[in-house]
């Protein structure tokens, strides 16, 4: 698709300049704006295995370090409460937040004590779909998102997930058992692996449908420089030329049971669904090592060092490290991306926020999307997307997240050599050491 190539080229040469961070001494969160809606993101950077394609802040699971980390995370939550923030929605990501279920449960309970929390989303892995974990999550978590990536055993072995997290057949049984235990159960999948065939993708789609879960997210495989070597050695080099075709296959295949609720998230027809957090919450606070926050048109980045994180929290200081203030045009682009990723942009609210119509403020973006046939509805109030438009939003989010990896790289420059090695350096060793803490 020529529009995909043009868009990819443009984004790769323009997003990066917007994401240069500035280190600010004694950086603090601004006070909350009365009446504004915020989301709370909590990051738990521990995994039992380090997947070769993942560039998020994550370390191999160590029970002692993780226990200390959860205690510091709860202290950081109390700091934000003291600033006057309130949250109705909490998202807990990683890493694998469920590595220490008792610590996680205490942390969720604290958010409900301090804030008016109505829903909690939490990520996990298939090997944690067992009663001793699920029993504690029920009632505490409303959206459980499980990282499956694929049901194909060959792909799971390439990703170094087969022996630790289970086979496709085993996990399909697990999903059928857990599907009704939470208001929303989401299966995270990835498409466009180099060795993934159309037949494998069709099979993955049918397994998701058979699982009975209420939601699925199919992420496009993203290649960033920080994980390029480990990806090339394990899953191979990404070919974006077939990405659009694969996206059309999954969109069509899922349509018999699911409907799109974002560019890459699909909800089972007729079932109530809890949205992905970025759709309903433009502004959010991220706590924990390696988290991001977006407040008042500024991006805040926390330290990626576990040692520095523990030190700052023990001193009663936030873990903020760097900041980037976005200009008005950059803020408009961010709103454009996030709302259309959620399949609808409200033109009137856009103009109220920025003092300009979307046609005037983002005329180049609007012209490109119109020429590409991206808009299904373009009237006085709303923009909505055609299937082509949904795929172009996948491209935008793919490039946005890849560019965010460069932000992570800027933040990682402060890591001590041993932490840097544990996080990314000897990835082959890290991915092939078996850790059994269960």
Image (cartoon, rainbow, N blue to C red):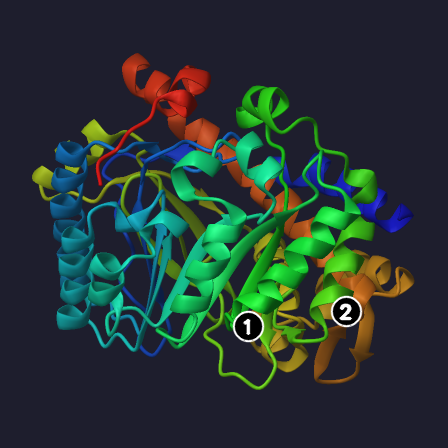
Where is residue 190 drawn, in percent x and y?
60, 48
Residue at left offset 39%, top offset 77%: 183
Residue at left offset 44%, top offset 51%: 298
Where is residue 256 drawn, in percent x and y?
72, 75
Between 369 and 53, the residue placed more toward the observer is: 53
Residue at left offset 23%, top offset 31%: 306
Residue 302 vs 262, above or below: the answer is above
- Does residue 253 appear to the left or right of 48 in the view shown? right
- Does residue 328 appear to the left or right of 145 in the view shown? right
Between 86 and 42, the residue placed more toward the observer is: 42
Residue at left offset 70%, top offset 27%: 237
- Dot 1 surroundings within 10 Å: few (below 14), some, or many (20 or more)? few
- Dot 2 surroundings within 10 Å: few (below 14), some, or many (20 or more)? few
Q: Earlier in the sequence, mark 1 or mark 2?
A: 1
Disc 1 designates what residue? Answer: 353
Residue 38, by quadrant, is: bottom left
SS category of the residue bearing label 1 = helix
Disc 2 designates what residue? Answer: 359
């Amino acid at each position: 698709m020529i529009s995909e190539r043009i868009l990819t080229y443009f984004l790769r040469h323009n997003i990066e300049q917007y994401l240069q961070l500035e280190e600010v001494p004694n950086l603090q969160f601004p006070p909350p704006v009365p009446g504004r809606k915020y989301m709370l993101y909590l990051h738990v950077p521990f995994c039992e295995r380090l997947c070769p394609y993942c560039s998020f802040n994550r370390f191999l699971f160590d029970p002692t370090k993780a226990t200390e980390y959860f205690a510091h995370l709860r202290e950081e939550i109390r700091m934000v409460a003291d600033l006057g923030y309130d949250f109705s929605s909490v998202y807990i990501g990683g890493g694998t937040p469920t590595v220490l279920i008792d610590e996680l449960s205490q942390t969720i309970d604290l958010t409900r004590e301090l804030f008016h929390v109505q829903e909690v989303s939490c990520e996990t892995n298939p090997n944690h779909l067992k009663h001793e974990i699920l029993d504690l999550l029920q009632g505490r978590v409303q959206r459980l998102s499980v990282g499956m990536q694929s049901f194909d055993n060959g792909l799971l072995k390439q990703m170094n997930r087969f022996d630790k997290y289970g086979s496709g057949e085993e996990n399909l049984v697990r999903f059928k058992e857990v599907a009704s235990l939470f208001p929303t159960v989401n299966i995270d999948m990835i498409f466009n692996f180099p060795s993934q065939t159309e037949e494998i993708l069709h099979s993955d789609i049918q397994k998701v449908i058979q699982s009975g879960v209420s939601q699925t997210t199919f992420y496009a495989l993203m290649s960033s420089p920080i994980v390029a070597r480990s990806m090339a050695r394990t899953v191979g080099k990404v070919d974006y030329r077939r990405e659009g075709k694969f996206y059309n296959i999954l969109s069509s295949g899922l349509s018999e049971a699911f409907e799109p609720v974002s560019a890459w998230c699909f909800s089972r027809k007729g079932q109530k669904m809890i949205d992905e957090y970025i759709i309903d919450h433009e502004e959010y606070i991220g706590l924990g090592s390696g988290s991001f926050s977006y407040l008042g048109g500024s991006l805040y980045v926390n330290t990626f060092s576990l040692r520095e994180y523990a030190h700052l929290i023990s001193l009663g200081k936030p873990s903020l490290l760097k900041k980037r203030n976005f200009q008005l045009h950059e803020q408009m682009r961010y709103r454009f991306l996030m709302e259309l990723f959620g399949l609808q942009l409200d033109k009137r609210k856009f103009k109220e926020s920025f003092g300009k119509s979307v046609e005037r403020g983002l005329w180049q973006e609007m012209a490109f999307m119109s020429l590409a046939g991206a808009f299904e509805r373009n009237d006085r109030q709303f923009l909505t997307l055609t299937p082509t438009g949904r795929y172009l939003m996948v491209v935008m989010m793919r490039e946005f997240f890849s560019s965010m990896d460069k932000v992570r790289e800027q933040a990682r420059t402060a890591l001590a050599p041993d932490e840097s090695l544990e996080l990314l350096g000897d990835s082959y060793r890290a991915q092939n050491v078996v850790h059994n803490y269960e």
